[in-house]
Image (spheres, rainbow, N blue to C red):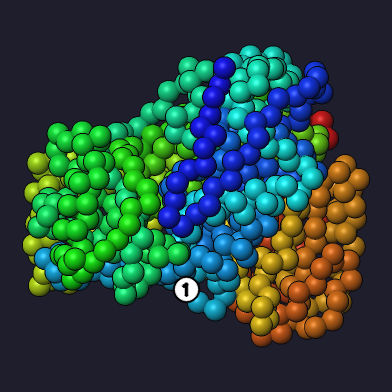
Amino acid sequence: MHQPNDEPRKSVYYRYQVFPPYLPRETEARQKVVIVGAGPVGMTLALLLARYRVPSVILDSEVQVSEGSRAIVYTRRSMEILQQAGVARRIAEIGLPWRFGNSYYRGQRVFRMEAPHDEDSRFYPMINLQQQYLEEFLLDEVCRSGLVEVRWGNRLIGLSQRDDGVEARIDTPLGEYTLSTDWLVAADGARSSVRSLLGLSLVGDSYAGRFVIADIKIDLDLPTERLAFFDPEWNPCNTVLMHRQPFGIWRIDFRLPEGEEPQEALRFEILKARIDAHLEMIGYEGKSWELDWCSVYSARALTLENYVHGHVVFAGDAAHVLPIFGVRGANTGFQDAFDLAWKLAFTLHGWSGRSLLASYSEERVGAAKEIIEEAGRSTRFMTPPTTGHRTMRDAVLSLSIENGFVGPLFHWRTSRPHVYARSRLNARDDDQALFLEGPVDGAPIPNVKLGLDDFLLDHWDESIHLLVFTEHEALPADVTTLQQRLRARGVPLRLLAISLGRRRVEGADLTLPDPEGRCWRKYGASADGATYLVRPDQHVAARWGNCTAHRIAPALERLVNRLGESA
């Protein structure tokens, strides 16, 4: 019988709540979606599905939110996704925003990274917040949704697939039960029980060496920026990272000496000596601190080759395991959830064919493989796996003292939104080549400031969007007729007019005034009628110089993946 730890976890700054385990009292009705894992990706997916009125059940083997800070850095793209899930504002209220990263060698700063940021950005490039708080905010929103049920203390111990769904066997502290569902989503982390039960293996690279994460409570007058120290005297040939977190917590991350076992590295006297040595190196000798949490991890860059197996779908760390360098883990998982949510909802509602989910796997596996390639370069520089890599890294370090041109080699290639340039959902005959500016097919659309506290993406919802840049008083009648035809099938299609004037555009669901033409310029709308077809996850599917229904209609059919199927 499953027995999760029901003692509140210890922390010097966070108060853990223990939730009662769940066991149904009688045989249950079949579920639409069961999500295994109540972490950030699982709960975000559930909230995004709820926007489509798709109910879900989340199973989690624990009875409290995650132990330790874990994922702490969320990118601008993640915040845009979390805005759709309803929690971005709460994160922004207590999180620590930042945009600079510093690399040091022999006491000298040898590179300073500056992430792009301008007035069109609602969110900073990065924001730091411990994962416990993110999970708490997501859980609060889940409870408010009325469409998501979280079952604590529920451990998946078996599953069987049928032609129309999955039957899962669940163990709890109160007994076992079975649960049937149309779709089961594995969001249960790097040690995924779903992946193990299906006998699936990850492919990619595992890098040599182990790394310690230690969260300490300490008062340091250092900025909220990424701090990387190469080849420090107390940990030669290795790298140490530091991040400020809210509530006086600092993350210190360093590689263990070769051959040292994790249990030895986590002994408090060993950990204290190393942290004290690092504090002394950066000018805080003798500074008192308090340990909150520590752990050991390995750098791995792995992915499944396919994220859809029958009626089981993988997302987040269950689908791919990425190195911590570059804040890629959770941030990649949020993009998985955003891509998967609309495709799973469209499939469940019958708005699209089942093959739409194949595009989820194609797009996100492609993204993971691209990230793995980038992460590999970063990881090999941070932790050279061979003598040759170390020789080259040491040469860069030596040159960096007096030669600024090598500085960019320290760049850590942070997580970024993927461009689905080869997606099967992109139009094949649009006017892509005519646009000199603006997001290309497959790219996420950029945000634009429209007013004092008003941005383009604030007006987004779960629909497919047509963004029409117009100076006319009304949208073309054939376009509004096309919208009505799609809506009659249930497909949510929203017409959004970007007007240079301030009057309402007839036929549009929403008119956004753009009197200064900021949005027009950012999207390369050089003439009246420029139109973007944008997926619910804010990625461009097509763009045209003119708003004409006969060209938009086939692109819409391709987008819902019904080409070759009965509509």
Is disc 1 surrounded by few (<14), some (14 to 19) or many (20+) residues within 10 Å? few
For this rendering, which residue is in front, 290 or 200?
A: 290
Amino acid identity at mark 1 = His
Find residue 384 and report its horizontal and vertical position in percent: 18, 45
Dividing the image into 4 quarters, which one contains the N terminus? top right
Question: In this view, which residue lies farthest toward the front?
Answer: 7
The residue under the point 69% across, 67% down is: 458
Query: Quick check: can you spot residue 145?
Result: yes
In the rendered image of this protein, does residue 316 appear above or below residue 467? above
- 493 and 271: which is toward the camera: 271
Horizontal and vertical percent position of residue 314 = 56, 32
Give the side of residue 4 with respect to residue 549, left or right: left
**Which quadrant holds residue 453?**
bottom right
- Depicted 49 relative to depicted 501: above or below: above
- In this figure, which residue is indicated by the disc labeled 1? 117
Q: Is residue 356 visible?
A: no
92 above or below 472?
A: above
Q: Position of residue 230 (x, y in %)?
A: 18, 58
Q: What residue lies at 25% left-to-right and 35% top-to-bottom?
A: 262
Q: Name the foreground residue: 150 vs 186.
A: 150
Image coordinates of residue 516 in percent, x first then y, are 66, 85
Q: Quadrant of the C terminus?
A: top right
Element under disc 1: loop
Looking at the image, is 112 positioned above or below residue 551? below
Residue at image point 65% right, 28% down: 184
Closer to us: 228 or 273: 273
| Left or right of residue 565: residue 139 | left
Judged left or right of residue 251, residue 185 is right
- What residue appears at the point 38 percent right and 34 percent down from the top-left corner? 302
Q: Is residue 305 left or right of residue 183?
A: left
